[in-house]
Image: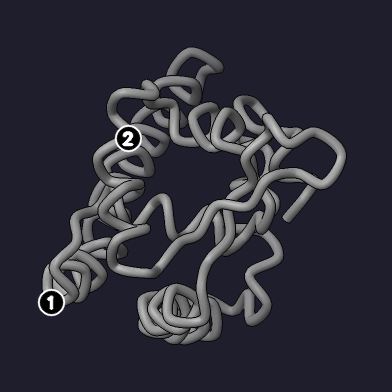
Amino acid sequence: MTKENQEIDDDLNFTRDLALFYFGYRAFIKQEDDLVLSYGIRQVHRRIIFFIGRLPGLTVNELLEVLDISKQALNGPMNELKEKELVYVKSNENDKRIKQLYLTEQGTMLDKRMNENQIKKMRQYFDESGDKTGTFWSKVMELYADEIGEKYVNRL
């Protein structure tokens, strides 16, 4: 096989991998989407809860950066989460102008509940793949994540 033919074969495999990544992501969030709706929230609420749960004390500006959304897009969902008593805001001890975000006990329980099925499925698939701990998958995801959120990935 010539080098050019090998490169074409490699590109075809990566094209398939891209499609698998897309379909895998759809399957990954499908079950969560159904659960999110059952709690009367939307995906944007879920993402907010998820990242506050991973990065307690995250500031509003940091959350805007992590989610890559505008302040206007965050305002409505954040107010709804506060009204539902899932999230609370606390002023920073050193600078009262800085608002830090935390999950309430109820928010933490909801976050855990929404992660359970995904974690269970990941464990199952890592086991079936022969990468029981997900080491290789995690490394690939870290490399991607570092491209846009390195300072947050290091805080996880």
For residue 94, what is the image quadrant?
A: top right
Question: In the image, what residue type sits under mark 1?
Answer: Ser
Spatial distance from mark 1 to mark 2, Cα to Cα?
Answer: 22 Å
Residue at (64% x, 32% y) in the render: 149
Question: In the image, what residue type sits under mark 2?
Answer: Asn
Residue that extends furthest to the top in the rendered view of this protein = 4
Image coordinates of residue 7 in percent, x first then y, are 49, 21
Residue at (44% x, 26% y) in the render: 68
Q: In this view, does 33 lie to the left or right of 3?
A: left
Q: Which mark is residue 20?
A: none
Q: Determine whether 71 is above or below 80 in the image.
A: above
- Numbered disc 2: secondary structure: helix
Image coordinates of residue 65 in percent, x first then y, are 54, 27
Residue at (66% x, 54% y) in the render: 55
Q: Observer-nearest residue: 37 or 88? A: 88
Residue at (21% x, 68% y) in the render: 36
Mark found first going from the N terminus, 1 or 2? 1
Within 10 angstroms of label 2, few (less than 14), some, or many (20 or more) residues? Answer: few
Within 10 angstroms of label 1, few (less than 14), some, or many (20 or more) residues? Answer: few
Q: Residue 38 carries which label?
A: 1
For residue 76, what is the image quadrant?
A: top left
Residue that extends furthest to the right in the rendered view of this protein = 94
Q: Residue 75 carries which label?
A: 2
Q: Observer-nearest residue: 95 or 18? A: 95
Q: In which quarter of the image is the C terminus?
A: bottom right
| Colouring convention used in this rendered image of the protein | one colour
- Numbered disc 1: secondary structure: helix
Image coordinates of residue 100 in percent, x first then y, are 64, 46
Q: Observer-nearest residue: 128 or 56? A: 56
